Amino acid sequence: MAEATALLTRPAEAAPPAEDLLLDLLAGAPHRVIDHPAEGRTDLASALRGHPLGQAAKCIVTRVKLPGRAVRYGLAVVRGDHRVDLGAVGRILGGTKAGFADAGTAERLTGCVSGTVVPFSFHPELRLLADPGLLDQEEIYFNAARLDRSIALPTAAYRRLADPRVEPIAEAI
């Protein structure tokens, strides 16, 4: 929680790299910025933003073990009312086993602390996967690399800007 507090108290001129990259990327796209009380849990953030949980883009950094000692990282983006199917992510990324990446690795690859990960990959080692169930929504919502600000983005704009690999990677909760 100390990391999240530090993120919130950081001066505006010291914005985290992911926030800067995100805002630059969205500059020409139709979107809304939503300020709200600090929250990183998908269900509670969705309530604060005032939208159905199914429109939230839940972002999970995964670690996939490949044959030998190699690993591959994925950013799995699913609806807020679903969970990531780690078996599917592992198969799609060519691995033998998949799990959640540790917090330090997830932060290094995304530039975001836990609860603030954006549904875009700005790192060459992080492969972006999106579940088609999320992309069926007209508009998606996600934290904007910080706990107290979110973005509402038309899904068509998200697909164009992020260009995710679309695969079934979600399970209903």
Image (spheres, rainbow, N blue to C red):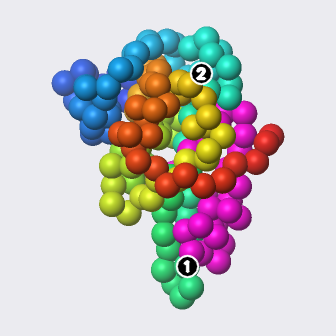
Camera-side residue of 133 and 117: 133
Residue 131, image x, y percentages: 61, 47
Q: Residue at x 33, y 49 (%)?
A: 122
Residue 17, image x, y percentages: 27, 39
Is 104 covered by the magenta stretch? Answer: yes
Q: Residue at x 70, y 48 (%)?
A: 170
Is 30 covered by the magenta stretch? Answer: no
**In the current view of this chain or complex, which residue is farthest to the left?**
13
* Image quadrant where one finds the C terminus: top right
Residue 160, image x, y percentages: 38, 40
Specify whether 111 is left or right of 4: left
Say which element carries label 2.
helix
Q: Quadrant of residue 10?
A: top left
Number of marks: 2
Camera-side residue of 40 and 164: 164
Where residue 66 is drawn, which disc sits there? 1
* Residue corresponding to mark 2: 45
What amino acid is found at the position of numbered circle 2 in the picture? Ala
Report if residue 141 is visible in the image: no
Mark 1 and mark 2: span between their CA atoms? Answer: 34 Å
Camera-side residue of 27 and 69: 27
Specify whether 147 is left or right of 80: left
**Local crowd size for mark 2, using a 10 Å CA cut-off: few (<14), some (14–19), many (≥20):** many
Q: Quadrant of residue 162?
A: top left
Q: Which residues are magenta?
A: 77-105
What amino acid is found at the position of numbered circle 1 in the picture? Leu
Q: Residue at x 68, y 62 (%)?
A: 88
Report if residue 109 is visible in the image: yes
Residue 108, image x, y percentages: 38, 53
Sequence-first tag of 1 and 2 = 2
31, above or below 67, in the image = above
